[in-house]
Image (cartoon, rainbow, N blue to C red):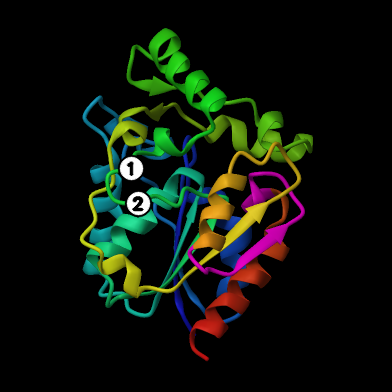
Amino acid sequence: MSTFVLVHGAWHGGWCWDRVARPLRDAGHDVHAPTLTGLSERAHLLSPLVGLDTHVEDVVRLIDTFALTDVVLVGHSYAGQIVTAVADRRPDTVARRVYLDAFVGADGEAARDLLPETVEHHWAESAAEQGFGWLVAVRKLSVLGVTEQADVDWLLPKLTPHPWKTYTDALRLTGAVDRVPAAFIECVDWMRVFAGQADRARERGWPVHELATGHEAMVTAAPELAELLDRLANEKGA
C-alpha cells in the first residue's frame, strides 16, 4: 500500500479531501491531508509573507517529521506548484506525482504565469482592489462547477482568502523532480482553466486522465477520484 499526501488548492484546507481520504484508507493506504499555512483553520497564521516557499515547507516538514516513504503526492489546482517543488526536494521519498486540474510549472515559472490571461487579470485585479494588494478573495463556487447546495453549504463556511504571493513566487528547481513519475487528471465539466496544463502534461509524456466533473473533484466526484488515485498508486508499484 502507499502513503498519500493530498495537498489542497487556493482557499481550501486539508478537510476538503475527507470524501476521498476515507475510501483510500479503506483500501489500506495511509493518508495525510495537511492544511497549508494561513488558510482555513490556520488562517490565524496568514500574513503578506506567506508565499510558495512557505507552503512547500509545510509539506516537506510533514514528510520529514513522519518519515513518510513511498509517497503519492497529489496536488489540486494551485498545489501543482507545491507538488513540483516538494518532489524536487525529496525525489527519493516521493514515488509519484499526481496533478489534479493543477499547474504544471517549470523552473522560473510562477502560478500567475500559467493562468489564462483573462483569469490572471481577474486574480490580480481582485488582489489589488479587494485584497489589500496581497489577498485573493474566494471565487464563486458555481464558477468552479459546484452546483449542489449541500456541497456549497459544506465548503463555503470553511474557505478563506488566499495569499497572492503564492501565485507570484517562481518555482526554483534543481531538476531532481524529473526523476519522479507524474500523472495528470483533468476535470472536464467546467470552464477548463487547466486544459493548457493538461496539454503540457501530454507534451511531457505523462498519462492524462479525465473526470467528468467540475474543478472541485474531491467534493463533486469523490468516489471516482478515489478509485482513480488508488489505481495510479497500484500502477506505481507495478
The residue that appears at 68% across and 30% down in the rendered structure is 143
Q: Which residues are magenta?
A: 204-219
Q: CA distance from mark 2 to mark 1?
A: 6 Å
Position of 113 with respect to 196 (left or right) is left
Q: Nearer the viewer, residue 29 or 83?
A: 83
Position of 172 with respect to 124 (left or right) is left
Provide the secondary structure element on which disc 1 rests.
Answer: loop
Q: Nearer the viewer, residue 171 or 231?
A: 171
Q: Position of residue 30 (x, y in %)?
A: 46, 75
Question: What is the quadrant of residue 212 in the picture?
Answer: bottom right
Q: Residues within 10 Å of mark 2 (few under 14, many from 20)?
A: some
Q: Position of residue 87 (x, y in %)?
A: 32, 65
The residue that appears at 70% across and 60% down in the rendered structure is 210
Q: Which residue is mark 1?
A: 109
Examine the rendered structure and indicate whether residue 17 appears above or below residue 228. Answer: above
Examine the rendered structure and indicate whether residue 198 appears above or below residue 54. Answer: below
The residue that appears at 64% across and 54% down in the rendered structure is 186
Q: Position of residue 159 (x, y in %)?
A: 52, 33
Kindly indicate whether the residue at mark 1 contacts the one at mark 2 (C-beta within 8 angstroms): yes
Kind of residue at disc 2: Ala
* Residue at the top extreme, as displayed: 129
Number of numbered labels in the structure image:
2
Q: Residues within 10 Å of mark 1 (few under 14, many from 20)?
A: some
Q: Position of residue 175 (x, y in %)?
A: 25, 64
Is residue 23 located in the magenta-colored stretch of the structure? no
Please tell me the numbered disc located at residue 106: 2
